[in-house]
Image (cartoon, rainbow, N blue to C red):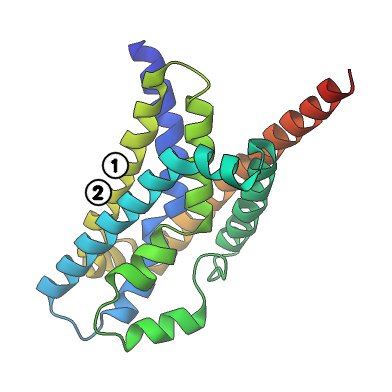
């Protein structure tokens, strides 16, 4: 059981952390809080990370119910989530700002807002379409096994939120230590991993959808 939890935890942390990718949020965070004091930046980072944690947790737990109400199959959502992740991952590999994550208009609007913690930092920068889709799919996988399979997914969300706070609260130091080259290397590496995750999501979704259709014919 312990070994299985560790394995599930490693997979969940890798997927959720690299989809949220708080390192790529550092330049946006600095741009939108350039006139703030260090204390206010830390407060903004804390609230953004907390809201992102709540959003991802709620969607991961309520995702199956939402699909049932809307009449959407999990297979279809896995395919859709995989497409969104693939678009995000390709932008990360090219180290260019992803419109799937946040648009220039949202960054410019955030720069003149008094409070940017919830919008656009928490949503959509941290808890965007890609990270929400990933959390829902991982939780759906976990629910196909014992109840405790859900714990690594929730733990991964909590870990990512905590890491996001640490990285954003020390955004100035993070940028100085890693530099543009370091951030670009991390983003490309994360993007490559996300391509594999996105394709796996789509393959799983296609397999489930085709399997359900074939079973329905017999």
- Report if residue 46 is visible in the image: yes
Residue at image location 26% in from the left, 66% down from the top:
171
| 146 up-or-down from 123: above or below | above
Name the residue that disc number 2 marks.
Answer: 162
Image location of residue 37, percent across then percent down: 13, 79
Name the residue that disc number 1 marks.
Answer: 159
Residue at image location 51% in from the left, 39% down from the top:
65
- Secondary element under disc 1, as helix, strand or loop, is helix
Image location of residue 131, percent across then percent down: 48, 51
Image location of residue 134, percent across then percent down: 51, 44
- Report if residue 26 is visible in the image: no
| 112 up-or-down from 125: above or below | below
Which residue appears farthest toward the left when viewing the image?
39
Residue at image location 56% in from the left, 46% down from the top:
194
For the N terminus, which image quadrant?
top left
For the C terminus, which image quadrant?
top right
């Amino acid at each position: 059981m312990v070994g299985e939890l560790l394995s599930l935890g490693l997979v969940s942390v890798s997927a959720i952390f690299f989809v949220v990718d708080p390192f790529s949020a550092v330049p946006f965070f600095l741009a939108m809080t350039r006139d703030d004091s260090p204390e206010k930046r830390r407060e903004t980072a804390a609230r953004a990370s907390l809201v992102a944690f709540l959003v991802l947790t709620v969607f991961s737990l309520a995702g199956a119910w939402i699909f049932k109400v809307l009449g959407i199959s999990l297979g279809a959502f896995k395919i859709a989530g995989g497409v969104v992740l693939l678009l995000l991952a390709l932008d990360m590999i090219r180290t260019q700002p992803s419109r799937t994550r946040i648009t220039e208009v949202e960054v410019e609007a955030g720069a003149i807002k008094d409070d940017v913690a919830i919008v656009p930092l928490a949503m959509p920068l941290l808890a965007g379409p890609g990270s929400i889709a990933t959390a829902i799919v991982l939780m759906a996988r976990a629910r196909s096994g014992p109840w405790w399979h859900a714990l690594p997914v929730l733990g991964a969300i909590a870990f990512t939120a905590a890491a996001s706070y640490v990285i954003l609260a020390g955004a100035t130091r993070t940028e100085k230590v890693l530099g543009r080259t370091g951030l670009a290397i991390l983003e490309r590496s994360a993007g490559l991993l996300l391509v594999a995750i996105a394709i796996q999501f789509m393959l799983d979704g296609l397999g489930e959808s085709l399997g359900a259709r074939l079973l329905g014919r017999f």
